[in-house]
Amino acid sequence: LRLRQICCDPRLVAPDAAADTSAKLDSFNELLAEAVDDGHRVLVFSQFTSLLALLRADLDAQQIAYCYLDGSMPAHARQAEVDRFQASSEIPLFLLSLKAGGTGLNLTGADTVVHYDPWWNPAAEAQATDRAHRIGQKRVVTSYKLIAAGTVEEKVLALQAEKRALLADVFEASAAAA
């Protein structure tokens, strides 16, 4: 867990660390600035609400408007944030916890999806990405995964590939038996 957190932002493990020590945060800020400048609207998923809190503080300091959703929010507050994002093109960013934002939401106002950190289950990430791929989407949706090279995150990607291959084998065997 700590290895995965430090890949996201050293402040998750060492709160006294400087924000400028995170290569992933630098990459995210560059991606975000380019997306906002080009008129894109972005969904950002992370499994760590503590990371989302750091991103919120950084966005507040940069005066970038955003919406936010995590599992601690009541259903009516979640829906209010979704409605606010969908209704206002002035809000370029929606921060979502992977588990809370992975199912049941229609976020066609976005055309860019960023997975800040990988999750073991590729289906959970796919469900999250699908929030922007809904009926009513009129734009091409681009999805990014931010992965720290040479870290445990690359091992998570390898595990995802193994799970996908295993699932494909199961479906193939099931189809052959039918």
Image (cartoon, grey):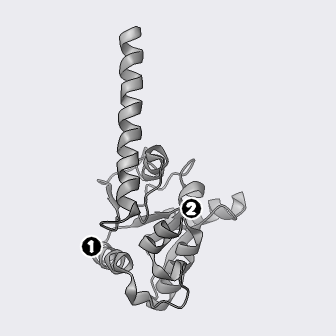
- Residue that appears at 39% across and 81% down: 22
Q: In the rendered image of this protein, does residue 147 appear above or below residue 53?
A: above
> In this orientation, does residue 112 appear?
no
Q: CA distance from mark 1 to mark 2?
A: 22 Å
Residue lying at 30% horizontally and 73% vertically, measured from the top left: 31
Find disc 1 in the rendering and name its residue: 38
Q: Quadrant of residue 9?
A: bottom left
Residue 142, by quadrant, is bottom left
Q: Quadrant of the N terminus?
A: bottom right
Residue hosting label 2: 82
What percent of the width, then of the height, locates residue 112? Answer: 35, 61
The location of residue 13, given as percent across then percent down, is: 54, 78
- What amino acid is labelled 1 in the image? Asp
Q: Residue at x 48, y 91 (%)?
A: 61
Q: Is residue 47 left or right of residue 133?
A: right
Left or right of 30 in this view: 163: right
